[in-house]
Image (cartoon, helix red, strand yellow):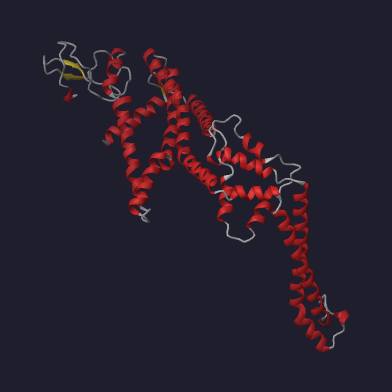
Amino acid sequence: MFARLRRLIDRFFSKSRTINNEPLNKVSLIVIILIDIFILINVFTGLNDISQWHLSPSETYPCYAEWQDYRTQTKPDKNYEMLRRSLSDDFRDRSPFQPDYQRVEKGHLGKVSEICLQYAAVKDKLDTPENQRLLNTIAQKQTTIADLEQSNQKIRSQYDSTLLEKIAGQPREQSINTVGAERAKQTLEQNQRQIATFESEVQTLKTNLLTKPESAVFFALLNENDRFNTVEKGYRQASFWYPSIQFTFQALFLLPLIFAALAIHTSAQRRGYGLVALISWHLLVIFFIPLIFKLFQFLQVGVIFQFLVDVMTVLFSGLLFLISYLYILLIPLIGFALIKFFQRIVFNPKRQAAGRVQRSRCLRCAKTIRHHDSYCPHCGYDQYMECQACHELTYKHLPHCKHCGQTPDLDRA
C-alpha cells in the first residue's frame, strides 16, 4: 500500500513539473507557481463572495438578537433600557431601521422576515422629537446625579481627615480637603436632597416616555409570544440550513471549473499539447484544494454532521467529548473513500491503459517508450502479461489479447 501511495505521489509531482515527460526549467516552474498562487487566492475570494450570496440567519431575522435579549432580561428597568438603546443613535445621521433591514436584500438571495420588517416599522415610530427630548433630559439629570454621588463619596472619604485637622487646630486655609468638617454633614444632606429630587424627576420622565402610544405599541409587539416564537423558529431553521446552503453554492462555483480543467487536461494529453496539459493539471489541483477544504469545513457545521451531533447529544447526554471520536472515525473514512475514488476512477490503470498503448507510453508512468520495449526504461514496469488462452504476451490492463482476442487472466496483471 505504501509503495502504491509513493508511486501516486511521484506521479503527481511528475505531472506537475514536466511537459511531455521533459522536466520544466526553474524559471518556468516559478512562473507556474506564481500563477497557481494568484488563481488560488482568487478562487478563495470567489468562494467567500458566493457563500455570502444567500442572506445569513442574522440578515434574514435581524430583529431576533435584540428581541431575544429583551425577553431574557430580568432587570426591573428593562423597558426603559430597551427604549434608550433604540433611541440612542443620532437619528439625524441614521436612516430608519426598516429600509436598513431591506437594503441587505439587494444583490442577495432570500428575503428579510416580514415580522422583523414590522418590528422595524414600529421601532421607527419611536423616533419623535418629544421622545428624543425626554431621553436627553433623562440623560442630563442622570449625569447630574452621578456628579452629586461622586461629590458625596469624596466628602465622606475626607471627613475623618477634616475632623483630625479641626482637633489639631489647623487653620482652614491650610487644609487640603475641599469641605471643612463643620460643613461636611450639611453638604452631604443638601446633595442627598438634590439626588432624591432628580431621581424623582427622572422616574417621572421615564414613565412619560414609556406610556407614549408608540412605546405601548412597541412593547406590545415585543411581548407577543406567537410572533417571537415564529421568529425564533425561523432563525433556528435558517441557522441549521445555512452552512449547507453555503457549501452548495461553493460547490456550484467550483464544479464547473473542475470539470473544465479536467476536460482540457484530458484533451491536451490525448493530443500531445504538453504545456496546456501542464497548466490544466495545475488548475485541476488548485480547484480541488478549496473543494476538499470546504468539504471538511461543511462536515463540522453542516446539516449531516449537525444531525449526527444532535443524535449523539440525545443518546449520550453530557458525554459530548464522544463527538471527538466521531470526528476521528469520520474523517479517515472520508479520506479512504476519496483515495478509493481517485484510485478506481480518476487514476485507474485499466482506464488509462488503452490511451497509453496507442501513444506508445508506459502503462505505469506514462513516459514515452519504444513500441517493442517489454520494460519501461524509466520506471522498470513490465508492460506485458501472458494470455491464459493462447499463452502469448499481451498488454496488461487491456480487456482482450492482441493475438487471440480472448480475455486474459487479469488477476495476474
In the rendered image, which quarter contains the N terminus? top left
**Residue 271, image quadrant:** top left
Residue visible at 69% across and 40% down in the picture: 96
Residue 130 vs 112, above or below: the answer is: below
Please state which of residues 309 and 85 is positioned toward the viewer in this rendering. 85
- Counting the numbered discs, the total is 0
Tell me which residue sits at (77%, 49%) in the image.
Answer: 130
Quarter of the picture holding the C terminus: top left
Residue occupying the point 66% across, 45% down: 123
The answer to whether residue 388 is left or right of residue 28 is left
Q: Residue at x 39, y 25 (%)?
A: 15
- Residue 375 coordinates in the image, percent (x, y): 24, 21
Q: From the top left corner, tell me how far across and down residue 198 is, in percent.
A: 77, 65
Q: Give percent across and percent down for residue 214.
A: 69, 47
User: Is residue 376 visible from the viewing direction of this image?
Assistant: no
- Residue 383 or residue 219, whichever sits in front: 219
Residue 229 percent location from the top left of the image: 51, 46
289 vs 29, nearest the viewer? 289
Res 317 → quadrant: bottom left
Vertical arrangement, residue 164 with respect to residue 141, above or below: below
Q: Is residue 399 visible?
A: yes
Residue 359 versus residue 228 in the image, above or below: above
Q: Is residue 95 left or right of residue 278?
A: right
Q: Quadrant of residue 55?
A: top right
